[in-house]
Image (cartoon, helix red, strand yellow):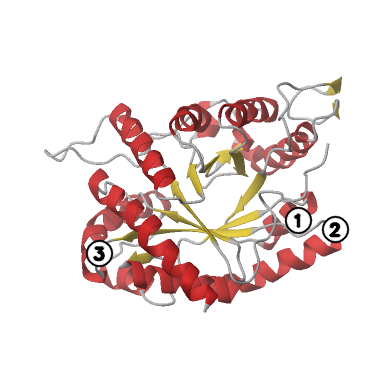
Amino acid sequence: MTDPSGSPTAPVGEDRILLGLNTFGDVGEAPDGSPQPHAQVLRQLLEQAELADAVGLHAFGVGEHHRKDYAVSAPEVFLAAAAARTSRIRLGSAVTVLSSDDPIRVFQRFATVDAISNGRAEVMLGRGSFIESFPLFGLDLADYEVLFEEKLELFDKVRAQKPVHWEGRTRPALAGLSVYPPLEHHLLPTWIGVGGTPESVLRCAQYGYPIIFAIIGGQPRGFRPLADLYREAMGKYGHPMQQMATHSPGHVADTDEQAREELYPHWLALRNRLGAERGWGPAGRGEFDALCSTEGALYVGSPETVAQKIVRLKRNLGVDRFDLKYSNGPLPHTAMMRSIELMGTAVAPRVAELLAG
């Protein structure tokens, strides 16, 4: 089975960029400062997905995590619920931690979401930047590389929707078994999320999958060599060019000042919590403001500011899609809803206008 012409991951051209949203289901704060229940976060997340669909955004992705500060551990279950409450928006993971899952079950779950959503499912595969799933599912971190490599190889064979012949050392072999349910009209759109290493870019190109770069620090223009490497490698492997995308945190409000003041304390709490886990030094306002600047990796500001920054990204890297990670630490639900609304009603049309000019 082959993807038809008009694939949902075909490049979109020089004068267009698709706009999506990503979230990890960050656990916010109740009015008394205590963490919200995870169940409430998930219910609010459905409201956010509905709004994203209503304002015409292209995609909504939820990331898989297994820790107390994020509520989404089973992306496909959430996406199935979102599929029943939306009509147009593409629904995917951001990312699925393939290394600690079973490739066959991943495919089956996303094939189910695709059926429920009438063909709107997509999966982003990655190794994940957190490792909590490894001890949770009894996996050895010493196998970090081989688990992803073997499971990606198996997933690719399952995705082809033909009898699967595969053997490796991380799970029992398969000898000509078929996997159900199949997708109705196309192959499952499958992305690979990368953090910025040439090896990850080449692996993605080897399989001919679209790529999404997680740009959470530094300057987006610094990813140009990796974008060029992907284009070159896709040609080398004989694959038709697929979409390139980037994922970055941000927040949209009515003014630049409002956006920065709303986001800063929540960004700082998240940044310093992860920094303490990973041995980074403490952050402050200077780092935040630098990341919010014209060349920084945070997309924070008024619709005009964010639109200009997305257009600059398009022209610097030539990407086809930009996903805003709109949930950042305990940012309130009301602020996220306003950010989503502005992303669809103000940022998207302004980006289209700028690129057409």
Please determine whether, in this image, residue 70 is positioned above or below residue 77.
Answer: below
Q: State yes or no: discs 2 and 1 in contact (Cβ < 8 Å).
A: yes
- Give the mark nearest the N terminus, 2 or 3: 2
Specify whether 298 is left or right of 190: left
Q: In the image, residue 48 lies at what x, y percent? A: 36, 41
Residue placed most toward the observer, 199 or 191: 191
Q: Report the side of 157 relative to 124 (left or right).
A: right
Q: Which residue is mark 1?
A: 205
| Displayed quadrant of residue 92 | top right
Query: Could you tell me if residue 296 is visible in this image?
Result: no
User: In the image, which disc is placed on residue 254?
Assistant: 3
Q: CA distance from mark 2 to mark 1?
A: 7 Å
Question: Could you tell me which secondary element the residue under label 1 belongs to?
Answer: helix
Q: What residue lies at 31% left-to-right and 72% top-to-bottom?
A: 289
The relative height of residue 224 versus residue 152 in the rendered view (above or below) is below
Q: Looking at the image, tell me whether mark 2 or mark 1 is earlier in sequence order.
A: 1
Question: How many numbered markers are drawn?
Answer: 3
Residue 112, position in %: x, y? Answer: 61, 25
Question: What residue is pinned by disc 2?
Answer: 237
- Answer with left or right where residue 108 lies relative to residue 292: right
The residue shown at (48%, 36%) is 132
- In depth, the one of 98 and 9 nearer the eye is 9
